[in-house]
Amino acid sequence: MEATDYKVRLEIFEGPLDLLLYLIKKDEVDIHSISIERITRQYLDYINTFKLLNIDLASEFIVMAANLMYLKSRTLLPRVDQPPEEDAEDDDPRWELIRQLIEYKKFKDAAGFLSLKEMEQEGSFAHQPDAADAPVEEPPALAEVSIFDLIRAFQNVLKRFEESHDFGDIIDDRYTVSDKIELLLGHFKPGESRRFETLFQSATTKAEVIVTFLALLELMKLNQFIVRQNELLGDIVIERRDNQSVAALEAAEVGADYA
């Protein structure tokens, strides 16, 4: 079975504007100072990686890719040769995209604030609970990783693999996604965590790297694995859920189906 024969269907709630905001944040630049050439190249890298992994993408991602390429072509033209635009407010071809990003970020930040308030309200009670022992301090929980963080980490692993391996020798692809799922479950005890990069240390082919990543995505969908990082663009940690956590999630999903 070839790696590209496996079709991945992820519930990617983030859209193309989320990806652009992620790329801007990663580069630590102001929205008003984005480089169309750079952000287009990075955006297309992500689209190509999604295609490499055979991940279904919403049409909005492709439309945004076409729009970025159009904007990039406009930035290469002399100002006198710019195509006429109705109601143009600025000679800078980036302006409409920048305006969309700023507006979208406002709503995204507002939604995040309201979600946080909702979580705080759920933890509030009208009466005082009985005195309890002081809670044991635990290390701060790692933040969950977005699909864009995960793809970025995979891109880095794949790049390092291609730079350090000689593809002159033909090596048979030995693993399917199902094989790698079984191997990952066998290598991780419930509750155990490891760095993302260690999953690919024994890989001998590019196809094996891809299949391993697809297996991880599938295990995340099955609620067997969770992916976290301690800071933006920090090291990504893979953790296998313990049996109690998996059972609780499955029970919650069954309850939601009957709600």
Image (spheres, rainbow, N blue to C red):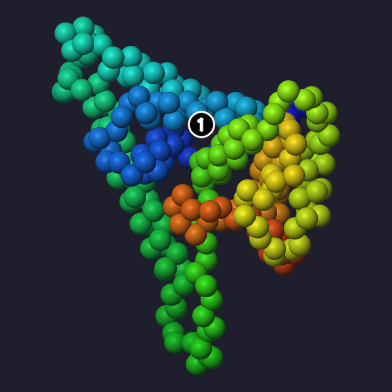
Residue type at numbered disc 1: Tyr
| Residue 218 locus on image (x, y percent) | 70, 43
Name which residue lies at 57% across and 30% down. 49
What residue is disc 1 on?
46
Vertical position of residue 115 compared to residue 62: above or below? below
| Residue 45 locus on image (x, y percent) | 50, 28
The local crowd at label 1, few if under 14, some if 14 to 19, many if 20 or more residues have their Cα within 10 Å, is some
Quadrant in which residue 160 is drawn:
top right
Could you say which is closer to the camera, residue 3 or residue 165?
A: 165
Name which residue lies at 55% across and 43% down. 153
| Residue 134 locus on image (x, y percent) | 51, 88
Answer with left or right where residue 87 lies relative to residue 101. Answer: left
Vertical position of residue 88 compared to residue 34: above or below? above
Answer with left or right where residue 66 lies relative to residue 1. Answer: left
Quadrant in which residue 239 is drawn:
bottom right
Which image quadrant: the C terminus? bottom right
Decide if residue 247 is in sight here.
Answer: no
Which image quadrant: the N terminus? top right
Vertical position of residue 172 compared to residue 193: above or below? above
Q: Secondary structure at mark 1?
A: helix
Name which residue lies at 52% across and 40% down. 152
